[in-house]
Image (spheres, grey):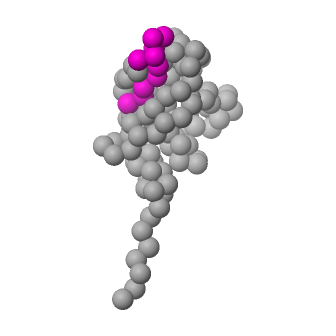
Amino acid sequence: MRDVLEPSIAERARTAVAAARHGVLATLDVDGRPVVSPVPVVADGSGFPVAVVSKLATHSERATRDRRASISIGDRLLLQGDLEPVPGIQQHELSPAFLHVHPDLAAQIESLD
């Protein structure tokens, strides 16, 4: 009988993120309660989810006060950590991948603030 190699939890998580088109982002309100809303996502080269969020969005405002956040991807993956802005050069590099998955968001991507 041969041993069957199963993908690691990290590999399964990266696969779920790579297949995702949307996630549910939770940031913390001033009083500490989570506020959730759907966001479009793509995976970066390392398998991390990347969402486009305008500086005008309430998520951005809350993230400047407290970077802790969670994102739910699909039915079985919840990632927790700190939100990090994507530097300008990486935004430029990720734009084609994002537009491939979300062509309807071209105007938002072109006017990133």
User: Which residues make up the magenta segment?
Assistant: 24-33
Please identify the quarter of the rendering in which residue 39 is found.
top left
Identity of the residue furthest to the bottom in this view: 1
- Residue at screen point 40% across, 49% down: 16
- Residue at screen point 42% across, 26% down: 26
Q: Position of residue 107 (x, y in %)?
A: 48, 21
Q: Position of residue 24 (x, y in %)?
A: 38, 30
Q: Is residue 37 left or right of residue 70?
A: left
Residue 54 seen in the figure? no
Q: Position of residue 93 (x, y in %)?
A: 62, 38
Please identify the quadrant where the N terminus is shown: bottom left
- Residue at screen point 69% across, 32% down: 89
Residue 85 seen in the figure? yes
- In the rendered view, tell whether residue 7 sits above or below residue 49: below
Q: Position of residue 72 (x, y in %)?
A: 39, 36
- Residue at screen point 46% across, 16% down: 32
Please identify the quadrant where the C terminus is shown: top right
Please identify the quarter of the rendering in which residue 66 is found.
top right
Confirm whether the magenta stretch covers residue 25.
Answer: yes
Please identify the quarter of the rendering in which residue 31 is found.
top left
Q: How many marks?
A: 0
State the residue in front, 22 or 9.
9
